[in-house]
Image (cartoon, grey):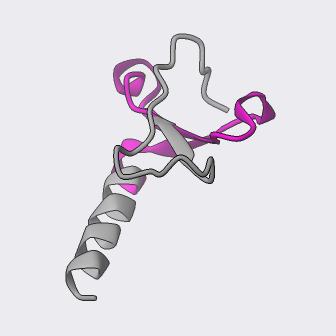
Amino acid sequence: MADSAGAIWRKSTRSGNGGDCVEVATNLLDREDAVLVRDSKNPQGGHLAVTARSWAAFTDALRENAINL
């Protein structure tokens, strides 16, 4: 698991106030080569680490599907 020390967590500006969000930290790419993802309702519950390449593929797919809706 990538070390989350120093992670700056953020959530989408499109997120509502319902609390059903994920937070991401991209500021550790140089150190960890990872994007960290966690549940905003349970920030102490751990995080998922994915490579920068995987994260880019994921967000590209989301954008592509949003355009095709």
Give the image quarter of residue 13: top left
| Magenta segment includes 29 | yes
Q: Residue furthest bottom?
A: 69
Give the quarter of the figure containing the C terminus: bottom left
| Magenta segment includes 44 | yes
Q: Residue at x 59, y 12 (%)?
A: 5
50 vs 53, left or right, is right
Q: Report the span colored magenta.
A: 25-54
Task: Name the spot of residue 62 as percent of width and height, x first.
Answer: 34, 69
Q: Nearer the viewer, residue 36 or 30?
A: 36
Give the image quarter of residue 59: bottom left
Q: Residue at x 44, y 51 (%)?
A: 15
Q: Nearer the viewer, residue 68 or 35?
A: 68
Q: Nearer the viewer, residue 52 or 24?
A: 24
Q: Is residue 40 above or below residue 57?
A: above
Q: Is residue 48 above or below residue 46?
A: below
Task: Name the spot of residue 30 as percent of width and height, x first.
Answer: 34, 21
Give the image quarter of residue 31: top left
Q: Residue furthest top?
A: 6
